[in-house]
Image (cartoon, coloured by chain):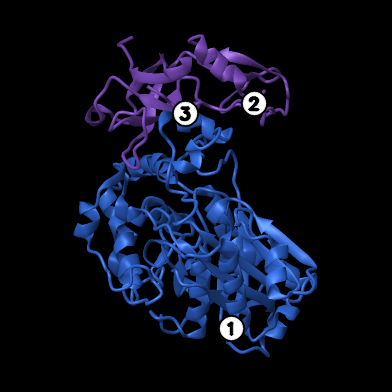
Amino acid sequence: MTAWLKDRAAIVGIGQTEFSKASGRTELQLACEAVKAALDDAGLRPSDVDGLVTFTMDTSEEIDVARNLGIPHLSMFSRIPYGGGAAAGTVLHAAMAVATGVADVVVCYRAFNERSGFRFGDTGSVLGGGLPLWLSWYAPYGMLTPASWVALHARRYMHTYGVTNEHFGAIAVVDRQHAATNPDAWFYQRPITLADHQASRWIVEPVLRLLDCCQESDGGAALVITTADRARDLAHRPALITAAAQGASSDGEMMTSYYRDDLTGLPEMGVVAQRLWEASGLRPSHITTAFLYDHFTPFVLMQLEELGFCGRGEAKDFATVENLSIGGVLPINTNGGLLGEAYLHGMNGITESVRQIRGTACNQVPEVEHILVTAGTGVPTSGLILSPPA
Amino acid sequence: MSRLEPSMSPDTAFFWEGAAHGRLLVQRCGECEALRHPPRPMCPACHSLSWDPYEATGRGEVYSFVMPRHPRYPGFDDPHIAVLVELDEGLRLVSNLCEVEPDDVTIGMPVEVFFATFDGGMVLPQFRPAAPA
């Protein structure tokens, strides 16, 4: 793959609302607040913006966001599919747009009332109205939630490599430990122990306990992307987009890819990983800290293997609290992740990565060189490598 | 007991109509005869659009299984077993595993299909431990 995009674009502004369980305002308002905050952070005006990118699942129309912000013209807008798999993909599209001159300043946004409004984790998503065609192969059998779809896949991984639910507890403990010292996190000052994890009730036995499952949250987040040249004149140290990639793989479905020869990996993330490493010229050992999408803990272990941080079947030994905490081999999810900070569909992992590059994170990792960010797994997905300027 | 009713398209209706008649049907390519499930219009091996319904033996083994516990929904025992079956024909499908306690289920266990009728007359394929051959 070409490295043509390497370090040509940068994230120059980040914005977010508070993360809550009931925002008390519309999703459109959350989107506008996040976009305005990101532009203020970048020191840019709405009139500088000519591109917008969001998720296909987002309910806030580009033209409504532009109308509220007073953005006069848009020359580029695109949407990324597959739920949380879109997160880093928004940045890829924005970076391609600014690097090619199609747009000058692109804002990526995601905002929802995913707790107080439409909850992904509830059966309401499938009980109202007719089933979508793809879900007709699962819902009649009681496979009605993302947790159940992920668990049936992860169970085969556990069987193959001798992984138990206790191994997943390390991810939950690390996330909650980082959230405990992040005032933005819903679980601020509320760490958990492995014993707490093991005492939490089954959601899908014997794979997922309550503390293996991410939160459901209300909130919004936004990112401002422009060229690396323009970034030099702006307020903050830019987060250069060293590599960005999307990935889908053969015989896949949206969370129910049960038909491949092997169910012990996340081949979509394998596609992303290969492109990120090739395009950046980097290796896993070059990554200072990572945000690994943690909607469900088992897929964090499988990501570590797909990304090459350890070998196949070795994540159960690699993913210890010590290794994944600050000071460890690979500190992850320093904001607390989707389990600890908020479920912002992966966008809060990107904002956190930008803070790490600026040196302004609550849980700052020393001497950050390169950061890896992944988007939702078990679905077509995406990833980023961000770096500070040389 | 009630279950959520599947939606159907012209590509998939044969499966559910087969189940209503006690037959587990999958697609067989009209050109290269490759089997496939879930149903779709084109053969990924030879790109043929012609296919026929093919009756599977209904025998296979447990490839993966879980017990969804929360949230609860009507129409299911707690716990109930959601199973990914690998059929003898090499295809996989999701169903329920019945007539067995969760503690007695193992991955690789031989299973066989049967058909259960739910509220409204809907028929779903279900699986149970296979009778000795």
Front-lying residue, A264 or A16:
A16
Residue underneath mark 2: B9
Residue underneath mark 1: A41
Badge 1, how many Cα within 10 Å: few under 14, some, many 20+? some
Residue B59 occupies quadrant: top left
Q: Amino acid at mark 1?
A: Asp
Q: Chain of mark 1?
A: A
Residue A4 at least partly seen = no
Q: Amino acid at mark 2?
A: Ser
Q: Chain of mark 2?
A: B
For residue A50, side relative to residue A177 (left or right): right
Residue at 38 percent across and 71 percent down: it is: A185
Front-lying residue, B38 or A181:
A181
For residue A88, side relative to residue A367 (left or right): right
Of the two numbered discs 3 and 1 in the rendering, the one whose residue sits closer to the viewer = 3
Q: Is residue A249 above or below residue A15?
A: above
Badge 3, how many Cα within 10 Å: few under 14, some, many 20+? many
Image quadrant holding the N terminus of chain A, namely bottom right
Residue underneath mark 3: B4
Q: Secondary structure at mark 1?
A: helix
Q: What color does chain A have in the rendering?
A: blue
Residue at 54 percent across and 69 percent down: it is: A221
Residue A317 occupies quadrant: bottom left
Q: What x and y, as percent, mark residue A242? A: 61, 73
Residue at 47 percent across and 39 percent down: it is: A262
Q: Label 1 to label 2, Cα distance in Å?
A: 49 Å
Front-lying residue, A47 or B60:
A47
Q: Secondary structure at mark 3?
A: loop
